[in-house]
Image (cartoon, rainbow, N blue to C red):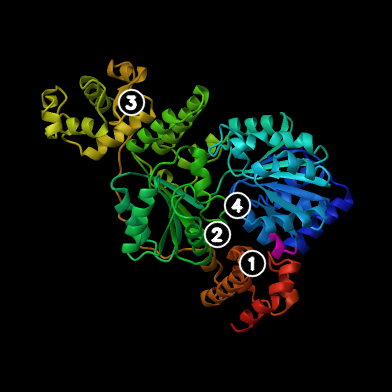
Amino acid sequence: MTGSQNALPPELEAEKYRVLKTAFGFDAFRPGQETVIDAVLAGRDVLAVMPTGAGKSLCYQAPALVLGGLTLVVSPLIALMDDQVAGLRLDGVVAEAIHSGRSRDQNVASWRRVASGEARLLYLAPERLMTERMLAALGRLPVSLIAIDEAHCISQWGHSFRAEYLALGKARTALPKARMIALTATADQSTRDDIVAKLFDGRADAFVAGFDRPNISLSVQEKRDAGAAIERYVAARPAASGIVYRLSRKKVDDTAARLQGAGVKALAYHAGMDASARAAAQEAFLAESGVVMVATVAFGMGIDKSDVRYVVHGDAPGSLEAYYQEIGRAGRDGAPAEALMFYGLEDIRTRRRFIDEQDSAPERKRVESRRLDALVGFCETISCRRQALLAYFGERTQPCGNCDVCLDPPEVVDATAEARLLLSLVRATGERFGAAHVVALAVGHESEAVTARGHDRLDGFGKGADRPAAEWRALLRQLVAAHALEVETGAYGGLVLTDKGRLILDGEERVTAAKPRPRKREKRRAATDAAIAAGVDEALLARLKALRRELAIARAAPAYVIFSDATLIEMAARRPRTLRDLGEVKGVGAAKLDAFGEAFLEVLASA
């Protein structure tokens, strides 16, 4: 992590650890947390970029309790606010949320607790915080800290840009005594610079934790009948929890229905569903094991489920930032997990069309295009995939040994002659046709679309018939990744020569490419998770989870805010017999020990 170091007075140092143990049940901070917390306690403004699962929330929750006064937490999602508040209350911390999803009477009651000094944290959406009335009221209270969650929403370069966040820098003027922390799971250098400029007027300590999640295996496959491929992949992982991302609501519904038809416990989630249906699907996913959530990117922000064993992208995401954040929802328990992306030129054409059609300035479109280029480069890399991903965020690493390229290195060959054949066919057909048509010409497929245009009489027609179509498709994708071809965004996704492509055609540049590998059959495997790795009694763990769910339902809270999976696994492994012993389990703070200790000890005693 980069940033300045801060030495705290002894009394703050002691209080920091007291809060960590009594409120949250931990003896030590996770890597990266303490440095950020110390900077906040020392009075610095902070931007913290920490990977999903690194414990970002504690970086403002602990200072809130140490500093006293009121901490404001700006969050983009109502469900995320409510989950955070529920979790803090179970930790014995008085926290409130004021938002449009609650009744006026509920919001008034929450405000009264805030105004009286009873509440330590108040969660708000940016739109509500930045009203003149709210800022004036907060100006009369001892606001000590403002925490901006999902801070990439501030930046027009961030992958979830939300214009309402732009006004948050003005909160500094209205609440001048408050220090500020902004947090996000993923932001490249341009996004980080933009956040610091807009929120902190260019002056803040920036802490960037390592982006690597080494337990997640990375792989990319050619996209051919994504629905069938996803079904095969999921069926080979019975009883494992996973997330499948699709680009559109229709694809979500179709994929979920297909998996359900194959006997998979699959649920759908997208913005076209009513709020109650989305909430029910999310709660089932969080509370039950072996559930597969098929969703658009509307699902995932703030999700805290530790045993997600895989994330599948049925369609290519829009950027490496989005990809990194989405795969980060897998393997939060530290056990092996997988990230698989299905990708093809059609995805790239669709994403380019989205960029062209968005109502934004030319500079933003250029940045988004460069980010899409980086994603294509990641998909077509012939070296370690993790190195390519981390390099995008400015981090260097050795080959990982846990991606498809490392585990099965491609054979790299001189493909200049083959590339020139494809490029010549693109030129000969007027740079108007997509990949499927060009491949058909290369292999000599005499379809009506080919013969009607006389393309079967071209010099290059059929000259690639000695190779399967899959090899020609792969080479076309690599030529796009190498910027020898561009994909037009029109209805047919025509391939267009670039200056580099013309140099290759003229014999002035050579081309190396990876030979496609035969598709491997999916092997059925049991779900690997931290419980198995820890050697705990799975029946006991199931009983502990059942009790957790009962307690969560009674409190109308997500199961994970009672205790995390990691805490239950440690309980099952250690089998404490007394309240004192139970209090030594990570994640069991004083308030939760008082509220739930006896009930969990009863289950543990029955084992």
Marks 4 and 3, how far apart at CA: 51 Å
Marks 3 and 1, how far apart at CA: 57 Å
Question: Where, by quadrant of the figure, is residue 543 drawn?
Answer: bottom right
Q: Is residue 356 above or below residue 206?
A: above
The answer to which of 186 and 481 lies nearer the viewer is 186
Q: In this view, does 39 lie to the left or right of 489?
A: right
The answer to if 192 sits in the magenta stretch is: no
Whole-percent x and y of residue 266?
40, 61
The amino acid type, in three-letter code, at marker 2 is Lys
Tell me which segment is drawn in magenta: 88-92
What secondary structure prevails in the magenta region?
helix
Q: In this view, does 530 lie above or below 147?
A: below
> Mark 2 or mark 4: which comes first in sequence?
4
Q: Which of marks 1 and 2 is in front?
A: 1
Find numbered disc 4 in the image and state the secondary structure of the residue it sits on. helix
Give the residue drawn at x 47%, y 55%: 274
Q: Which of marks 4 and 1 is in front?
A: 4
Give the residue drawn at x 13%, y 35%: 447
The residue that disc 4 covers is 78
Residue 562: mark: 1
The amino acid type, in three-letter code, at marker 1 is Ile
The answer to which of 125 and 393 lies nearer the viewer is 125
The residue that disc 2 covers is 305
Q: Nearer the viewer, mark 4 or mark 3?
A: 4
> Mark 4 or mark 1: which comes first in sequence?
4
The amino acid type, in three-letter code, at marker 3 is Val
> Mark 3 or mark 1: which comes first in sequence?
3
Give the position of the C terminus as an image quadrant.
Answer: bottom right
**Proximity of marks 3 and 2: CB atoms separated by less than 8 Å:** no
The residue that disc 3 covers is 511
